[in-house]
Image: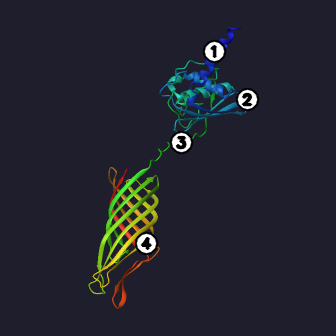
Amino acid sequence: MRSARPIAIALALASARLAMGDAGFVELTWNAPDSCPDRAYVLAEVARLLGDVHAADDARVRADAMIVRAGATLRLTLATRVEQAAPWERKLESPNCKALADSAALIIALAVNPSRAGAAPPAVSAPSASVAAAASSASAPPPASAAPAASTSASPPVASAVAPAATAVVDSDPGPPPPAREPRRSLQVTLGVAPAIDIGTAPVALFGPQLTAGVARGLMCAELAAMWAPDHTRAVDAPAGARATFTSFAVAPRAGIRFGQSLTIALLLGLDVAAIAARGDDVTVPESSRVTRVSGAATGAFAWALGGAWFLRADATLLVPTTRPRYFIERVDLEPAEVHRTPWVTARLSVGLELRL
């Protein structure tokens, strides 16, 4: 008896090591009546089918299994998910709960590694005469004339193997296969440069370069635009020969949604903060002033693909100032002459290039 105990302990350790050999590759949720084999049995059978050595092409599998009574038989519903792929669901029926557990283990093992599971030796207990090809139904959908067959929405390729006793269930309307999961959209960076024109800020249209930098993911996008308009001068009626010169620098953070690929349409809302400098030239009392104007901004952007990562982009922005600055030129012994007052709505237009990274 002393020599038998070490042998029994060694066999128990080997069995535990075999059962856990592929446990790291299988995450199993098992719900079954008390009379059925438990979760540990299924994992041990998966390990037996796969062997005790991991292979480089082993896949990680999540499996959710439930066995319920359906009249005189038992029904197994097994959903498996390989890595990040869409789940596959199968339904099997059998009066023998152990046969359903063995079928579940075989399907899971085939999902982990078809070649290893297909090469595994059969279980010691011989399958009964009512064996159904559960593994074959897992590998490919049966022809329309075949019956019965396992119901499955999609299934990975597997090697042929002998399945334990189980009867496949035929769904009356299995429905179309689930759509493939769309790849996760990555963050896209956009850079743009364009000549722009500002209408309404000054009594003369302001021209200058505009730079934009933004990010986009899916439908959402956000960007920061900056425009600099150097000195623009306009002659004024009074006093004779006087001139008014305006300079502007504006920064506009905005965000919104965009649609399309080769032709992109974007709608953005945000703020526009402009620092405007004005001075009077050739006047008796030269003077200058600076004002900061904050406006609400709504932008419509259109971009056409030119090739590669380059796009031709056109922007149209409407600005609603929160204040309406007024500009005057002082005159000796006369009332100040108004040069310009900001209107209720101004506009900014641009056409340029955009690079998407």
Q: Which residue is mark 1?
A: 10
Quarter holding residue 124: top right
| Residue contact at pointers 2 and 4, CB within 8 angstroms | no
Question: Which one is closest to the eye, mark 3 or mark 4?
Answer: 4
Query: Is tag 1's residue or tag 2's residue first in the polypeptide sequence?
Result: 1
Residue at the spot of label 2: 34
Residue at point 51%, 24% (across, down): 54
Q: Is residue 349 left or right of residue 102?
A: left
Check disc 3 and give the amino acid type: Pro
Q: CA distance from mark 2 to mark 4?
A: 75 Å
What element does badge 1 sit on?
Answer: helix
Coloured how?
rainbow
Determine which residue is flagged by label 3. 178
Residue 25 in view here: yes
Q: Are marks 3 and 4 in contact (CB under 8 Å)?
A: no
The residue type indicated by label 1 comes to Ala
Whether residue 235 is situated above or below residue 59 in the rendered picture: below
The local crowd at label 3, few if under 14, some if 14 to 19, many if 20 or more residues have their Cα within 10 Å, is few
Separation of marks 4 and 1 at Cα, in angstroms: 83 Å
Which x, y percent locates residue 196?
Answer: 33, 66
Compute the Cα span from label 1 to label 2. Answer: 29 Å
The residue sitting at the left extreme is: 241
- Pick the residue in front: 49 or 173: 49
